[in-house]
Image (cartoon, rainbow, N blue to C red):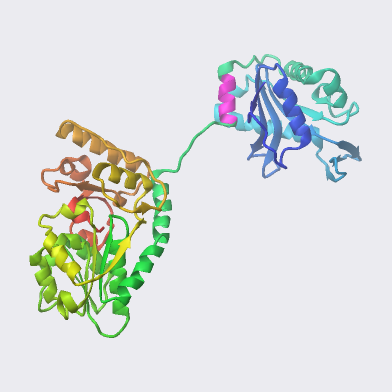
Amino acid sequence: MRMVPRDLLSTRSVTSSERRVYDLLDAADIPGVALHSLNLPEHDYKLTAEIDLLLVTDRMVLVVEVKGAGVSVHDGVWTYFDRAGRSRTSSEGPFGQAQSAMYALRRRLSDRLGRSVTDQLVFGHLVVTTDVDLPTGFEWDQATCAGRTDLRQIGIQAIVDRATRYWAEKQRGRGSIDAATRRSLVNVLRPDFDKSPGLAARADSLETSFDRLTSEQFDRLDVVLDNPRVLCSGGAGTGKTFLAAEVARRMAAAGDGRRVLLVCRSRPLAAYLARRLAQPDVIVRSFDTVDKDRDRADHLIVDEAQDLMTFDHLDLLDQLISGGLADGRWSMFFDPNRQAHLHTGFEAGAFEMILATQPVRANLRTNCRNTREIAFQTRLLTGADIGNPTAGSGPEATVVRFTGREEEAARLQQQLRQLLDHDVPPETITIVSVRGDWDTSVAAGLRHSRRHRVRQIDPAWTASWPGDSISWASAVDVKGL
């Protein structure tokens, strides 16, 4: 007989008597399936009930109630003893227990499969006492019970055959159970499934990890706060922008009246940070909106500094800080990898000039914003070192190839549909374009875009991030976000 589960684990919930009957059924040549420990969430007078063993054979559905050690009954009260001598009492008795479970099972199957199916099936119950023999009783037929002697002399297969004949005689006209019906019954009773957490659930779990993995960033925070000039490097996802914002927040909270200016090249990033650093002594500007007279500060923070590493850019930054870049207080956060070249004009000589001011160097090596799969794929495709990913594992990073705009649009639409089907909130989905031209992008022509469900990222959008729809951004504008 096929047993489900295939093996019984060693656990206190499996009694030695159940294990013995399980092993006997496993060795028997009975066509069908035996399910061990089947829970019934709906029962007439119990919150839940359990069937010790349920047999779905080629002829019937048989509920088997197993009792071990000693059994006694006095004045209608049943007492069960285990091998250690402990006892418990019940007014129901094993036959009433098996019968009520059988009726509850039949109703549940009728609800799932329909009465047209269950009305053709033979249902019955059998009580097995592995260590004692019950006397002939007025309330049960000998065919519906088996004791120690029956198990030793005629065996479990004959016991099941005897019970089957008894119940079939009581339910004449009901046919045999073919293999397809048995599979349907077992699938309803104990379905096989392999469910993985959806993308939304996995994203929530990873977000918790992202928030927790900031110890290295806080160590670097002390370095930045304790030194006049600091150059902090790290790949995408190592928390540079998080650290830059926290430095600005801490300095403004000191209450000594010193002004802090945080500068980056991206307008969307500046709008994002300005909303989160709305403090009187903190100024947040994108580089193209800086006013050298109005925005002078006591401490300068530059995020994504690789995007401003030219002599012209440094000349203006030099004018924004008391003491200039050579003697003033500043912190620069930069990415040494290839994304430094998304903006043209990186000048090695300008970087050498910054190094000549002898800043304290700090490196971020822990990637707390990207999964292992993303970090691996990034290294594979670009050679960039974005640190050691410690946030956990996520979905595989996949590469989708296409031959033209029509196929590109179809594949992008398919990707969006898959994400939404996995309950990923639209506002957490961003399409990033390396070319960065919204008007000519395939995203602009998607059904979601025509229905205003895809929005181009701009400063107004990032100020109130994450919004309520799918977003689209150029690779340049999404940096730091």
Q: Is residue 44 left or right of residue 276?
A: right
- Snapshot quadrant of residue 94: top right
> Which of 357/278 is in front?
357
Q: Residue 135 location in percent, x, y?
A: 91, 28
> Which of 25/376 is in front?
376
Overall secondary structure of the magenta section: helix
Q: Is residue 156 left or right of residue 33?
A: right
Residue 23 visible in image? yes
Q: Residue at x 18, y 46 (%)?
A: 433
Q: Is residue 280 magenta?
A: no
Q: Is residue 377 above or below residue 128?
A: below
Q: Is residue 385 left or right of residue 314?
A: right
Q: Residue at x 63, y 40 (%)?
A: 41
Q: Residue at x 26, y 51 (%)?
A: 469
Q: What segment carries the magenta color?
A: 181-189
Q: Is residue 401 left or right of residue 208?
A: left
**How many numbered callouts?**
0
Q: Residue 467 location in percent, x, y?
A: 27, 57
Q: Is residue 467 above or below residue 401?
A: below
Q: Quadrant of the N terminus?
A: top right
Q: Residue 214 location in percent, x, y?
A: 39, 62
